Structures are given as C-alpha cells and as structure tokens.
Image: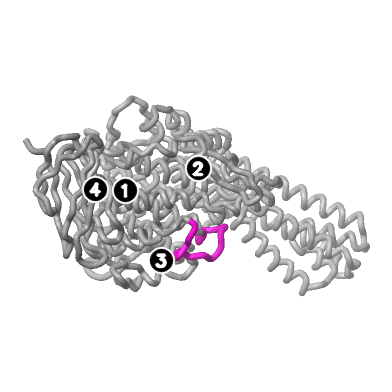
Amino acid sequence: MNPAITEAPPAVSTEPGLEPLEPAAQIALIPERSRPDGPVTTARLRRTVAAYAGAVVAGAALTRAAGKRPLANAGLGLTAPGAGFVGAKRPGAFAASQGAYGLSLLAWLGSGNILAPLTTWLGSAALSARRGQHPAGRLARVAVPASAIAAVAGAWAARERGHRAAVARRERRNAHLREIAAREPATPRRLPEPQVEPELTPDELALARFALDRALQPVGEWNGFDRIEQFQTSSVRYQVTTMGHALSALQYARTPAFHGYLSQAQRNLIDKWQERICWAYWAKESLWGHLRHNPDPVPRDNIMLTGWLAYQIASYVSNTGDTRYSDPGSITFRHPRGQEYRYDLHALVETLADNFERSDFCLYPCEPNWIYALCNGYGVLPLPMHDRMFGTSYAERVLPRFRRGFEQEFLSVDGRTIGIRSSMTGLTIPAMTSILSDAAVVWQLAPVFPDLARGLWETVRHEWVHVPEHGPVQIEMRGWDKIDTGNYRLVPATALAAISWAAKEMGDVKLAERLLADADATLDPVVEGGVKRYRRASTLSNAALLGAIAAGPFTHRQRVARGMPQAWQIGPILDECSYPEVLVVLAVSDGHDLRLVLYPGAGPGRRSITIADLLPEQTYDVRGATVDEIVPGPDGRAVLDVDLAGRVEVTVAPRS
C-alpha cells in the first residue's frame, strides 16, 4: 500500500511536541461499509420502522374494532397523519392536516420541537373521530394501512438500490484518490512552519473593518447584525462566532504581534455570547425537545453553543496567552429571573467530552435530537487545543471514537458528509448533504484528521468544482448551497465562503483566489467610510469571507495543532492603539524585533501606540516613528508617536 493512503484511523498521538503530518502527505480512502448506514443509525432506523409498524397495527385493530363508529377514523389517523379524515370523507381537512404536519416537521427540524409533529399527528386523529365513518371508509380501512406499508417497503427498497449505486461511486472515487496518492512522495512530511502572510491590502483591510466595527461596539448593542430569528442559522450567535473565527485567523496569519483592539474585539464577541439573545432559545428547546425545563444552555446537548463558544475561546487563548477564561465564572449566563449558570473554558471542554462520551454516535445533538456534522466539527476542536495549552488528555479520550462515529454514521457510502441526522429516529435530510457541508467539514477536520479532510477535499474538488481558464468557477450546487444561511436569501454567499476557506486550508490558494474574485464580481461589494461589505450577502457570510481572505495555507491546522510559535510569543507586541484612528495591517516579531505596518483610519494625524513585552531598560532602535530610540520601563512597555498620513512601516529592534 502506498504510504500516502490511509484506510484506517491513525493512532492519536499524545507525545508532547510531536509535529503533525502535512495534509498533503496522507489521503484517507472512503471506508468500505456493507450496509447503507452505520450500526447506530441502522439500529435507530429499525427501531423507527418497528414503532411505526406498531402504530399501523394498532390503528388497523382499532379501526376494525370500532366498526362504523367515529373511533374508526381515529384508528386510520394513527396510521398516517390526517388519514382519519379520509375515512370521514373530509378531503379539505385531510389536505389541511398534511400542510400542518409539514409545518410541524419544519418546527421539529428547526428547533428540536418533537411535540409539534406528535401533537399534529395525534391531534388530527382525534379531530377526525368527531364524525362517524363514511361508507367510503370501508375502502380506506384497507387502502390506508396498505399504502403505509407500501411506502415503508418502497423507501427501504430505494435505500438498498441507492446503496448499490453508492458503492459504485465509492469505488470510482477511491480509485481517483489512489491515483493522487501514487503521484506524491511516499515519505511523510511535517506541517510547514507557520509563516505570517503578506500585509492586508487596502481592500482586505476595509472588509476587516466590517467585522471590527460590529465587534467593537458596546457588548449589548447589535448594530449591523442581521436579526431575523434565533433558532436556526440566521441567529446572531452564528454571526458572533463566525466573526470570532475570522478575527482569530486574521490575528494568527497577519498580525500575531498585535493584541490591542483586535484582542478586545474577540473578547467582546465572547461576551456577546453571554447576552440573553444568544442563549434564550435553549429554555424553549429543552422544554419541547427534552420535555423538561432547563434554561442552562451548557450541560446537555446544544453543541451549537458549547462547542462553538469553547472553540472561539480556545482560539483566543491560544493566540494571545490570555488565560482570563480559566477563572471560574468567567463565562456566566445570567437569567432574567436571577439564576446564574457559571462556567469557564475548562468546564465547557469537560462538558463537550462528557457529551461525546455519552452519545451512541459520539457526535451529539445541537437542537434536541438533531445531530449536525458541521456543529460537531467545531465542537471537537477545543479538545486538542485544551490539551496543548493545559496538559489534559481530551483528544486521547474522544478523537478515536469521534472519527469512527463520523466515518460510520456521518459519512455516506460514497464519501459525502451527511449534514444532519436525527439521533432519535436515524433519519437524515438528503438536501443537507451538499458541497457547503462538505467544504465546512473539510476545514474543520483538517487540524485533527488531516488525511480524512484531504480525501474529502479531493473528492469535492474533482467532482463538483470546475475551474475554466476564464470566467467564474463552476460549482455544482444543490439544496442549501444556493442559500445564504445568514439571511435565507437565494444567494450562494455562504457556499462561496466555505469552499474558499477550505481551499485555502488545503493549500489550493489559486482556487481560493478565483472564488474570492467571483464573490467580488457577484455579491455587490461596496466601500463606505473605509468599510467594505457585500450588499448581497448576510453579516454571517461577510464575516466568513473575511476568514477565507485573511487565512493562509494550512492556517487552521497550524492554529489548532501548534498555536503560536515560540518566537511569536516571546517577542515585542503592539499592545495598544486607538481604533479606527490606527489600522494595523501587519504585526510580526521574530522574538527580538517588531515590524508593524499601519494606516490611518480617521484622517491623517499623530497617533500614539504602546509597545509591550520589551526587555526592561534595554535600548531599542526605532524607525518610522517620531523618535529614533526608546528605553522601556521596568514593565517592558513604551509609548511611541507615529505620524499617519498613509502607509507607515514601523520597526523596533534591540540595539546590539
């Protein structure tokens, strides 16, 4: 076997300081599976079919026992939603019940409201029993159960046919992956040393200000955020976390030696998570999904809060070394009735590990009973980051089982990411298996399972992304790929951002640049007051596009698996400057020198900046400021004045 191919999960190494393999060095094949679904999903589906069969049998028995009495309609109603109205010969009521049931399924999907479909189904059965059975009901007694059985049998048969077709696609795709691996070196390579990407261009800086303006406003204000609903993807919490990921990537890849307002913006976004609007949904979802009242959004399920927030905090801590979120109660959700739910980064990560270990799938739900691969992709990332920073062993506890769970239960037979699955029934929604989900998961899993991410990416790149010599990139989209998930408009902004970010992470910079150029050509960019935004895109998608633009090749993997290189950690930093008067487009240290590139953001003028982490009493030579040298005080800090009228480069270096 070519060493570049992996067919089984590699062992998880916990050896301190071990450098991970470069993503290009390994490619995971699509795992073989003899059944359409993994063992846990298959068991759930069988249980669901058995429960439905029981309902059909009970309904048929009740209909037969009731004769012509109204209760016979209720028996038919147990067999299928609204079917009792067929027995009562009320076609209008039957049609209305079908529409109501469809809406109840949307409520179940969108908010975990399991009561909605159950209440609609059983309620329509009860309502149909208010009228005696029509003579035509005799035919319905046979036709309704027979149709139910035929529908289940047909779905099962289609599942088997689909499995055979998927096996053929898997073999074709694996052959393609083997061809790629055969052209690559057999000797594994290490992940390249992190490199600071080139300074932000004026256009990139203008888009960065889109996120900074929103993040730096008072925590309780939401100017510039889309406020549509707070249950699904347009929720402000997803806008908050996407901005956090983008700014974290910006800090790591472009300005690792800058804290100041960039770190403050990330702290503000973490604080925004604790605002009631970001977590109030959970009290309702817990009530109608778990059938218990528990406003505390952390302990059970809800990885869309615990996982996303823990990853955002871990990214901030890794970039800055600021451990304030290790303090007990540093993350506190305050209920209007006076309750306080107090956590910190350690408690959030422990909660994640506990939920992963309790779940039969390993991956665990967002909304009650619904498991999203994408949410779990974020939720698994804080584990290795916490291990690296605090010496724990969460990755060893969780990652091997997480990979098995993902490959068996959330990877289709032909190698597509299954976007969503019901933990209760095992059912999925085919429209959410899409290139958007595939690309997002590629980016997420690259730091923890680089060979798996590489295999997924090569399939996406080969089959659904076509790059002509001229003109826009052609992407084969389906389902929610064509929708901006931040505002539900028919614009593929989110997909463009996700694919661009994945391409960057996998080292395909040219594709990312083409896609980002397509975004500029189609999403109606505008610059107002030095701030750029895409008018056809949501706030969420604007932030995601910033993340794709700011990052470099392998940035995410380096940021999660390695963190800041030592030289970046021990060198001088730009610690304070005013926003938007001073705009930082590059800040890098080699452990001794500091290099900054600054722009004015509020007109020309003399501005003060504060440099920190200098050697006390050491003389430093300065270029680009109003003085030629500085001698920091005992606290290692010094203030510089800089005249800003355009691009200014400032260097601070210890005198030999």
The image position of residue 381, as x and y in percent, is 42, 40
Labels 4 and 3: the sequence-earlier one: 3
Q: Which residues are magenta?
A: 220-235
Q: Which residue is mark 2?
A: 331
The image position of residue 14, as x and y in percent, is 37, 26
Q: In the drawing, does residue 387 fall left or right of residue 106?
A: left
Q: Residue at x 38, y 72 (%)?
A: 535
Q: Residues within 10 Å of mark 3 (few under 14, many from 20)?
A: many
Labels 1 and 4: the sequence-earlier one: 1
Any magenta on residue 229? yes
Q: Nearer the viewer, mark 2 or mark 3?
A: 2
Labels 2 and 1: the sequence-earlier one: 1
Q: Residues within 10 Å of mark 1 (few under 14, many from 20)?
A: some
Q: Which residue is mark 4?
A: 610
Q: Residue at x 59, y 58 (%)?
A: 110
Say which amino acid is labelled 1: His
Q: Residue at x 48, y 63 (%)?
A: 479
Labels 2 and 3: the sequence-earlier one: 2
C-beta proximity under 8 Å, tags 1 and 4: no
Q: Secondary structure at mark 2?
A: strand
Say which amino acid is labelled 3: Pro
Any magenta on residue 155? no
Q: Secondary structure at mark 3?
A: loop
Question: What color scheme is it?
Answer: one colour
Say which amino acid is labelled 2: Ile
Q: Residues within 10 Å of mark 2 (few under 14, many from 20)?
A: many
The image position of residue 46, as x and y in percent, is 65, 43
Q: Which residue is mark 1?
A: 176
Q: Which residue is mark 3?
A: 492
Say which amino acid is labelled 4: Thr
Q: Nearer the viewer, mark 1 or mark 4?
A: 4
